[in-house]
Image (spheres, rainbow, N blue to C red):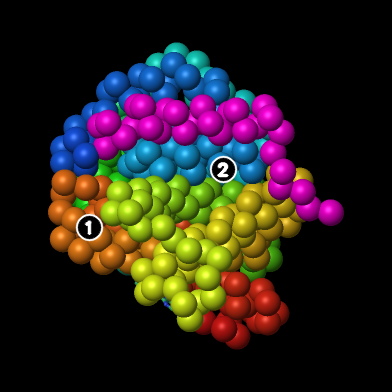
Amino acid sequence: MIDFELTAEEKAKIQEAHAVAEKKFRPVSRYYDEHEHEEPQEIIDFMWENRGKGFVTGLGVVGALMVEELCWGDAGLYLASPGPGLGGAAVFAAGTKEQWGKFLARFNEGKPKWGAMAMTEPGCGSDTSAIQATATRDGDYWVLNGEKIFVTMGHRALDLSEGIIVVWASVDKSAGRAGMKSFVVEAGTPGMKVEKKEKKLGIKASDTVTVTFDNCRIPFSNILGKAEVKSKTEGFKGAMATFDVTRPMVAAQALGVTRAALDMLRDEIDKRGIKIRYELPRSKQTALERDFIEMEANWRAAHLLMIRAMWQLGSGQSNALEASMSKAKAGRAATLITQRAVELMGPLGYSRKNLFEKFMRDAKINDIFEGTGQINTLVVARRLLDYTRDQLK
Ligand SMILES: Cc1cc2nc3c(=O)[nH]c(=O)nc-3n(C[C@H](O)[C@H](O)[C@H](O)COP(=O)(O)OP(=O)(O)OC[C@H]3O[C@@H](n4cnc5c(N)ncnc54)[C@H](O)[C@@H]3O)c2cc1C
């Protein structure tokens, strides 16, 4: 039986994350939205000092619910918080215990550090089989060459800290997907360079950069998974295992921003003396009431899917279907709900005096990274219908 009831201790942790979101993130939320590329130093210091509380790891149901709370406060500041991030999730999903020690222990000691993951290239996003970056074996080393774009937290991981980046590259282009492997590169490795920072629509407190690799040499043991090119799907399994962790995490981020918009909308409706009459039949409710109830129901459906995907992950079950399902649903729900909140508020929704327009901008990314809504829907369809990648494109 699945039981998602939380213990008193778990509830207290989530409440603590909510307090951080409310008292630390929200007061500076607009400032860092309007000062893109400025370091939110007070947040970085606070989050690093309090890293032991597990606010940002996002693993398990409680971890995901804590991430949801932080993103209720500000999704960009959550992403900017030091921690292993997507790179850490990749090491966790596809690495050995020795690699966990070598690459993840740093996130518990010393100065603030970040982790990043780089798959996307100028000519390759959704279609990861088109990856052009290469990893060539040279004795006890791999030599990486290529260009990665839109790397979340690449600047802070590589320029500002002794962090890590997990890089996807092909060890054998003739083998297609089977030749694709992931490699951990430590900050400061010669041949790796952060080239430029993007200016973005939302999540502006997070950094997004281009990283180039020019004969970048890393130890042979930095490969995640096996080096041999065997079956057609072997190499890609590592990536998929990473997505099983990161997709529900992104769903949790989406749900946090979306709930922020819903909560603010409810407050505004309350202020106007309007009560949502849940008990009335649909035909007797106003359009506003119907819209609001529909938005809440949509949010809750996405929330339950995310919890299920995280619960499966935490209990060692396969969650590949639910990970994509929860990400596709939450990304879409976030886009629709935050946009509807702006519409319902009229000029107040569009104005920068309120955060509605910011929530809408911050929400959209969740339907893009870690597989777009369309790609995750495709993954779900393939899995439900038992079609291969070639049968359903
Ligand atoms: C702010 C930000 C941060 C990011 N962070 C990272 C990161 O940390 N690491 C990283 O590796 N990448 C990152 N990305 C890149 C992101 O994962 C890609 O943008 C995304 O996967 C889409 O790839 P693409 O941009 O090449 O779009 P394309 O693949 O060209 O897609 C364009 C459109 O076509 C649709 N489409 C494509 N193929 C199909 C299909 N078969 N069926 C139906 N529709 C399809 C897509 O859904 C999309 O709507 C980030 C992007 C942004 C904007």
Of residue 238 and residue 321, the one placed in the foreground of this image is 321
Residue receiving disc 1: 349
Q: Which residues are magenta?
A: 1-29
**Is-magenta flag for residue 3?**
yes
Q: Which residue lies at the image location 50% right of the left edge and 16% below the top edge? A: 109
In this rendering, would 54 be left or right of 338?
right
Q: Secondary structure at mark 2?
A: helix
Q: Which residue lies at the image location 37% right of the left edge and 43% below the top edge? A: 75
The answer to whether 373 is drawn above or below residue 45 in the figure is below
The answer to whether 50 is drawn above or below residue 203 in the figure is above
- Queried on whether the Cβ of the residue with tag 1 lies below 8 angstroms from ligand 1, the answer reads no
Specify the amino acid type for callout 2.
Ala
Across and down, in percent, residue 84 comes to: 49, 34
Of residue 268 and residue 141, the one placed in the foreground of this image is 268
Across and down, in percent, residue 30 comes to: 21, 39
The disc label shown at residue 261, or none: none
Number of dots carrying numbers? 2
For disc 2, the neighbor class at 10 Å (few under 14, some 14 to 19, many from 20) is: many
Q: Which residue lies at the image location 44% right of the left edge and 16% below the top edge? A: 49
Q: Quadrant of residue 47?
A: top left
